[in-house]
């Protein structure tokens, strides 16, 4: 108690001894403030406000579909190179339009959105297995073995694409990857994840697209032994419509020029193994596979 | 030279799986089956695959070149038999998935003969002649014969033994460990082909310019140690060859672990043994070198163990390279009711095959057929429980890695973390999966991680 009395009583003495310190501190503070003020003016980094605007217009999912690590990098890149405008597939045409407005550009009507299709339709019951795979549940690991399933081209169904998808738009249903088109944003991450390159990005000009759901390049006889729903390259579809072609024992549909017509519908009906089917948000259930022939083990 | 039969030398880590070598250890090397169709793979080694030098329909002689490559790290392949090339087609490869192979049909006019090993007298008599081969001649003969490391990795032997001014070699270790359970082919070679192996060692030593040679044999093969000791005693001027018994432990036969055990030196992570002046050759490779240099014969046959509880007549056979696995098993009494899994190689590192048309390659040391009961015991899928961080895999790992960290990183697609924990340093010996009480397939994840890594680097065709 005594000590505090002394300090309070002596406050004037204290001020007399402390004022040089106070002045020094004030002088230093003003000097630093001045230095910071000058630095902020001289060394200013001019950030284009448009980058911030573009970043806000983007979906901010950081999915990497555009080829850049994240949305902010894409925002910077698209400002410098307007050719990159339509690269944001989760955002779609709306985002492209918004970015175009920020950059005061006029964009023409963009093409149809691109969505993935899985070039296989074989569920577990349709496939032939020579052995029981006992390894870890990953398509990449199974694909490293020569005979995880008889067909070397078809879907393995261990779900590497499901793990890769950030939008919960892919599911393994009974041994086959099925795309949920209502959730899919077209970011194409699944395309890179598939070790068998089964997934292809296709322009969806119509709500439901006709697809050739097979990738088997073996000759028809071998394919038939392996899979109940494999393309046997019978060329029936090519006789119906010019959009179909056979390459490497596999039917191929010209997806870019595809328009639904009577010929393509007939081709779908005539396909003996039911490989040609509709995929899309409201696609009809594909007709069931014919009974598989007894496979040679 | 006094030789102890108890090996004291070893490496840290490792496991002791059941040996099960008594199934075939006493079975002498017998001639293999006569084949109806051969599929000689064009890529049986580490390095650039060969291009076929024959066309469908061409007639081939035994030992004729059928595939070659200009790349330095590569080895040519030869036709083992007299016959006609049917086609060059894709065949199941034990490691590479589907890979091109030359399919050869034997000449119907020639009576079929079972492949027989060469007489050992040829090598005993050639002892004095070994001096006349120059190192260049030996390297060229080894390259021409298409010899690769026959222990399993299949690295072209010429690349190993050729003197490299940047990486001078001073020590050669001859690997007779055969630490993998079940396999006995190297053991039988050491017992029966001892002279041939020593001739090969002398030739390889001369070609590589090494000053000293260690022959490392695990101490669970006392007869082999004795056989090599006696043969070395009778052979003139072999003072530089030291016979060292090593402790029986898996994976003692792995290159880096063997160097650690014998020389107590560490090969740098991601490096190769020549960086510390050492080369390691398998005993079967040494035998092949002797055959290639002295008899000018290419590598078209190899000794192989057909074993496992599910085979009727397990044994060691002298087999034509390119024989389908199915025919070989058929020759040994066929698959029985109990058999469930055919593994090329031993149970620890071997690769299960589903296609019995898969041909034998230069690096296939064994065909192991396991029973349903054994598979059920070892089955991982469905029995896997969470990692309890017990650390057994860390103790077992001979490379001092943290397998559980790497496996979890790979599982969650974080290759960057996996690489921080040295994913590529794993030698896939399988010790971690073997000891894991949670039945996590650690080696499987690490192998998958390596595939992911290769795909990331765009080396592997997708």
Image (tube, rainbow, N blue to C red):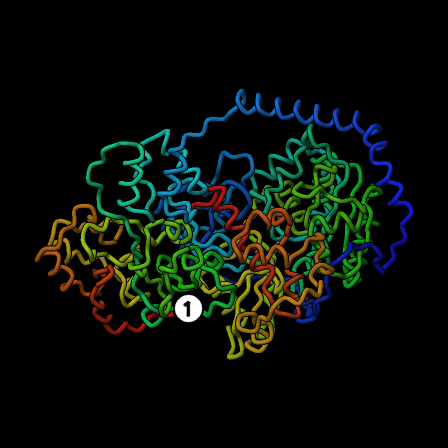
- Tell me if residue B26 can be seen: no
Relative side of B108 to B453, left or right: left
Describe the element under mark 1 as helix, strand or loop.
loop
Work out whether residue B84 or residue B253 is closer to the camera in this orientation and state it: B253
Work out whether residue B436 or residue B340 is closer to the camera in this orientation and state it: B436
Image location of residue B127, percent across then percent down: 74, 43
Work out whether residue B183 or residue A116 is closer to the camera in this orientation and state it: A116
Relative side of B347 to B179, left or right: left
Image location of residue B116, percent across then percent down: 58, 57
Q: Which residue is mark 1?
A: A130
- Tell me if residue A292 can be seen: yes
Image location of residue B442, percent across then percent down: 60, 61
Relative side of B45 to A179, left or right: right
The number of numbered discs placed on residues in the rendered structure image is 1
Relative side of B458 to A290, left or right: right
Q: Which residue corresponds to the image point at 37% horizontal and 38% vertical from the top-left?
A: A53
Structural crowding at the residue carrying mark 1, measured as other residues with C-alpha within 10 Å and reported as few (<14), some (14–19) or many (≥20): some
Rendering quarter of residue B16: bottom right
Does residue B5 sit above or below A105 in this rendering? below
Does residue A60 sit above or below A40 in this rendering? below
């Amino acid at each position: 108690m005594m000590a505090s009395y002394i300090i309070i009583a002596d406050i004037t003495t204290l001020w007399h001894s402390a004022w040089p310190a106070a002045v020094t501190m004030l002088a230093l503070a003003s000097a630093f403030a001045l230095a910071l003020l000058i630095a902020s003016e001289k060394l200013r980094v001019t950030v284009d406000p448009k980058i911030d605007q573009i970043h806000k217009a983007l979906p901010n999912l950081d999915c990497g579909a555009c080829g850049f690590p994240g949305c902010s990098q894409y925002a910077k890149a698209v400002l410098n190179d307007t050719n990159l405008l339509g690269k944001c597939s989760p955002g779609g045409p709306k985002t492209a339009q918004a970015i175009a407005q920020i950059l005061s550009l006029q964009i023409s009507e963009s093409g149809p959105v691109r969505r993935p299709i899985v070039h296989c339709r074989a569920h577990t019951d349709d496939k032939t297995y020579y052995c029981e795979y006992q390894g870890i549940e990953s398509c990449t690991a199974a694909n490293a073995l020569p005979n995880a399933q008889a067909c070397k081209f078809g879907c393995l169904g261990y779900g590497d694409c499901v793990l890769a998808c950030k939008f919960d738009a892919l599911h393994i249903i009974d041994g086959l990857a099925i795309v949920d088109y209502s959730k899919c944003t077209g970011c194409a991450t699944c395309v890179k994840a598939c070790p068998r390159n089964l997934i292809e990005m296709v322009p969806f000009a119509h709500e439901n697209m006709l697809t050739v759901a097979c990738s088997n390049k073996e000759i028809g006889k071998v394919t038939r032994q392996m899979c109940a729903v494999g393309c046997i390259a019978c060329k029936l579809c090519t006789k119906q419509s010019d959009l179909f072609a056979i390459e490497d024992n596999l039917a191929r549909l010209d997806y870019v020029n595809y328009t639904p017509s009577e010929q393509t519908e007939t081709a779908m009906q005539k396909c003996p193994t039911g490989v040609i089917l509709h995929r899309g948000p409201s696609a009809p259930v594909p007709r069931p596979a014919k009974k598989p022939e007894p496979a040679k083990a | 030279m006094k030789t102890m039969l108890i090996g004291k030398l070893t490496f840290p880590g490792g496991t002791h799986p059941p040996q099960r070598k008594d199934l075939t250890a006493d079975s002498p090397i017998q001639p293999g089956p006569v084949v109806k169709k051969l599929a000689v793979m064009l890529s049986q080694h580490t390095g650039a695959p060969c291009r076929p030098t024959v066309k469908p329909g061409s007639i081939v002689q035994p030992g004729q070149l059928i595939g070659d490559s200009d790349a330095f790290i590569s080895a040519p392949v030869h036709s083992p038999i007299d016959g006609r090339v049917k086609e060059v087609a894709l065949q199941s490869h034990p490691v590479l998935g589907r890979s091109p192979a030359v399919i050869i049909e034997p000449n119907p006019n020639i009576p079929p003969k079972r492949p027989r090993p060469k007489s050992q007298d040829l090598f005993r008599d050639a002892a004095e002649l070994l001096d006349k081969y120059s190192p260049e001649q030996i390297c060229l003969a080894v390259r021409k014969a298409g010899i690769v490391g026959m222990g399993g990795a299949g690295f072209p032997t010429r690349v190993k033994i050729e003197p490299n001014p940047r990486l001078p070699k001073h020590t050669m270790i001859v690997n007779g460990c055969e630490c993998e359970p079940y396999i006995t082919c190297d053991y039988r070679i050491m017992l029966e082909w001892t002279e041939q192996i020593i001739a090969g060692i002398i030739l390889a030593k001369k070609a590589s310019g090494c000053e000293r040679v260690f022959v490392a044999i695990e101490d669970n093969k006392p007869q082999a140690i004795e056989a090599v000791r006696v043969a070395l005693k009778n052979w003139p001027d072999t003072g530089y060859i030291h016979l060292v018994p090593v402790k029986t432990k898996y994976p003692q036969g792995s290159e880096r672990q063997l160097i650690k055990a014998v020389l107590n030196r560490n090969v740098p992570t991601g490096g190769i043994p020549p960086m510390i002046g050492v080369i390691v050759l398998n005993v079967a490779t040494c035998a092949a070198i002797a055959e290639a240099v002295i008899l000018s014969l290419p590598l078209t046959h190899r000794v192989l163990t057909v074993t496992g509880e599910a085979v009727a007549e397990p044994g060691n056979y002298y087999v034509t390279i390119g024989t389908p696995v199915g025919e070989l098993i058929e020759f040994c009494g066929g698959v029985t009711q109990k058999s469930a899994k055919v593994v090329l190689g031993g149970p620890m590192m071997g690769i299960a095959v589903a296609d019995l048309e898969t041909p034998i390659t230069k690096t296939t040391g064994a065909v192991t057929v396991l029973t349903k009961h054994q598979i059920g015991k070892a089955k991982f899928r469905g029995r896997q429980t969470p990692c309890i961080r017990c650390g057994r895999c860390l103790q077992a790992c001979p490379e001092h890695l943290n397998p559980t960290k790497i496996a979890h990183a790979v599982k969650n697609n974080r290759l960057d973390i996996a690489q921080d924990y040295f994913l590529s340093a794993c030698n896939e010996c399988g010790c971690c999966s073997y000891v894991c009480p949670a039945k996590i397939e650690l080696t499987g994840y690490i192998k998958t991680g390596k595939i992911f890594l290769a795909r990331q680097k765009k080396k592997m065709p997708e």
